[in-house]
Image: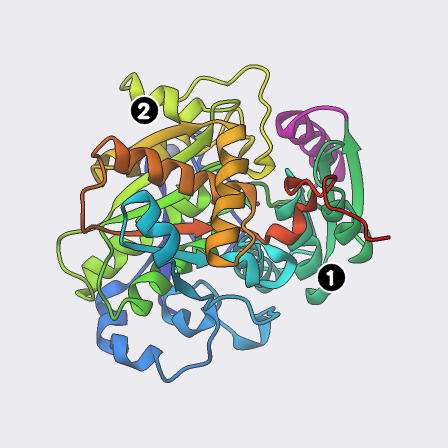
């Protein structure tokens, strides 16, 4: 294993990686660091192509020491699809969609859960707990079950019921709250405090390894493009783990010498019903203020007060990226339009990225000829109500 330590991106404090850690004492998330010069000596990019088609092909850049601790359901190496018909319609000829709907539990949360649970198991955790908007709970409950670990999950009543069912099926201790993810977070904090160390806090960015799982999307995009970077990567941002992870992966690859100096511009997409990052980006702030009365069909990105706000905003600015808010009616219209043209039913969060792509191209921020990658972060099948079938005729 090439993991060396954890460090704090805010205050610079370093922490040992061989024992359980949550946030830095200053309150910031911690980042996992590797001996990258040693990785560059140990493996070349061509090697990855000879390995199994899952995220563990990047094991030198992942935090699990003993392969016996790897908890897997075959996650990762999702297709990067060309979408020429929809792309032509919106003026982006080289538009691609990375379809994370195909990972176990139907969302890219499985990447974070696979790596997070594997590392937690390696460090002796017996029960994890987290607040969730649905998909993270499904994924962590599922991987915890597979690792023989307990999971306590708290989610809003309004979260997709399929996620509730997945948690129950996986034997998790599931609790519901009549509120938003922040309310669920307060209940989780109480349960952890009462547990006297028996429950490990695996909430978004509260432990450093979920991010490591999600960063593999960045490695995959670049490997799938023949170790070339696209011009723009568009990501539906809730807690921002995927965006921070892709940014981290791109910088690791640059340091490893696997990509050149020029990196993609990163775009954070939010809903006009919950856009704390977009607001902070537009006003030049380094922190985001909590969003009041959050609501959107894109449930996975309803995060009014993301813990990783500083890291998200820093990644957007460092990459010369931007942040865009899109409204629910347009998200649903693009979801339908895309499905009819390309045959893939996106999740609303993925569709939100298409709306953003369309608007950024129309406004000239995305230039003609640029290669644009959109993340479809989950399976459209988990959100059947996005398609209205009430007008379908019944034959006599
Ligand atoms: C969680 C989630 C997101 C947002 O992911 P973050 O890493 O929290 O920004 C986007 N789409 C779907 C489908 C999700 O479940
Ligand atoms: Zn710190």
Which residue sits at x=56%, y=31%? 302
Extreme-right residue of the structure: 396
Of residue 123 and residue 62, the one placed in the foreground of this image is 62
Q: Quadrant of residue 63?
A: bottom left
Q: Nearer the viewer, mark 1 or mark 2?
A: 2
For the residue labelled by badge 2, is the local secondary structure a helix, a strand or a loop? Answer: helix
Q: Is residue 260 magenta?
A: no
Which residue sits at x=22%, y=35%? 365
In the image, which residues are magenta? 178-196
Which residue matches tag 2? 281
How much space separates mark 1 and mark 2, taking CA atoms? 39 Å
Which residue sits at x=33%, y=43%? 90
Of residue 64 and residue 182, the one placed in the foreground of this image is 182
Let me know if residue 285 appears in the view: no
First in sequence: mark 1 vs mark 2 = 1
Q: Is residue 1 left or right of residue 298?
A: left
Residue 16 percent across, percent down from the top left: 42, 52
Crowding at label 1, few (<14), some or many (≥20) Cα neighbours within 10 Å?
some
The answer to whether residue 355 is above or below residue 396 is above
The answer to whether residue 140 is above or below residue 366 is below
The answer to whether residue 238 is above or below residue 82 is above
Which residue matches tag 1? 145
Ligand 2: quadrant of the figure: top left
Q: Most prominent secondary structure in the magenta stretch?
A: helix
Q: Quick one: quadrant of the N terminus?
A: bottom left
Let me know if residue 4 appears in the view: yes
Disc 1 vs disc 2: Cβ atoms closer than 8 Å?
no
Q: Is residue 237 left or right of residue 12?
A: right
Crowding at label 2, few (<14), some or many (≥20) Cα neighbours within 10 Å?
many
Residue 8 percent across, percent down from the top left: 36, 40
For the residue labelled by badge 1, is the local secondary structure a helix, a strand or a loop? Answer: helix
């Amino acid at each position: 294993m090439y993991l060396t330590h954890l460090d704090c991106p805010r205050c610079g404090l370093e922490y040992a990686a061989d024992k359980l850690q949550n946030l830095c004492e200053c309150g910031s998330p911690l980042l996992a660091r590797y001996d990258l010069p040693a990785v560059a000596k140990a493996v070349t990019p061509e090697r990855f192509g000879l390995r199994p088609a899952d995220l563990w092909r990047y094991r030198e850049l992942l935090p699990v020491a003993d392969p016996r601790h790897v908890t897997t359901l075959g996650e990762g190496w999702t297709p990067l699809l060309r979408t020429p018909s929809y792309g032509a319609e919106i003026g982006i000829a080289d538009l691609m969609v990375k379809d994370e709907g195909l990972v176990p539990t139907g969302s890219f949360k499985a990447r974070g859960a696979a790596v997070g649970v594997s590392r937690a198991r390696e460090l002796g955790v017996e029960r994890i707990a987290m607040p969730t908007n649905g998909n993270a709970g499904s994924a962590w409950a599922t991987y915890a079950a597979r690792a023989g670990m307990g999971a306590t999950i708290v989610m809003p009543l309004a979260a997709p019921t399929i996620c509730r069912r997945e948690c129950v099926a996986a034997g998790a201790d599931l609790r519901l709250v009549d509120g938003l993810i922040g309310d669920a977070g307060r209940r989780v904090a109480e349960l952890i405090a009462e547990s006297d160390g028996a429950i490990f806090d695996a909430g978004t960015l509260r432990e450093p390894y979920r991010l490591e799982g999600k960063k593999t999307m960045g490695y995959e995009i670049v490997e799938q493009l023949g170790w070339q970077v696209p011009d723009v990567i568009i990501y539906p941002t809730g807690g921002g783990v995927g965006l921070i992870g892709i940014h981290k992966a791109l910088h690791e690859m640059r340091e490893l010498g696997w990509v050149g100096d020029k990196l993609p511009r990163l775009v954070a997409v939010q809903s006009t019903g919950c856009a704390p990052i977009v607001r902070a980006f537009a006003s030049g702030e380094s922190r985001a203020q909590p969003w009041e009365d959050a609501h959107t069909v894109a449930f996975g990105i309803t995060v009014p007060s993301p813990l990783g706000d500083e890291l998200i905003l820093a990644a957007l600015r460092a990459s010369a990226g931007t942040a865009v808010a899109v409204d629910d009616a347009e998200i649903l219209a693009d979801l339908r339009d895309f499905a009819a043209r390309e045959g893939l039913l996106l999740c609303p969060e993925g569709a939100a990225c298409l709306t953003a792509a369309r608007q950024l191209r129309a406004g000239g921020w995305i230039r003609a000829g640029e290669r644009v990658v959109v993340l479809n972060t989950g399976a459209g099948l988990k959100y059947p109500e996005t398609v209205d079938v009430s007008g379908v005729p019944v034959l006599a």
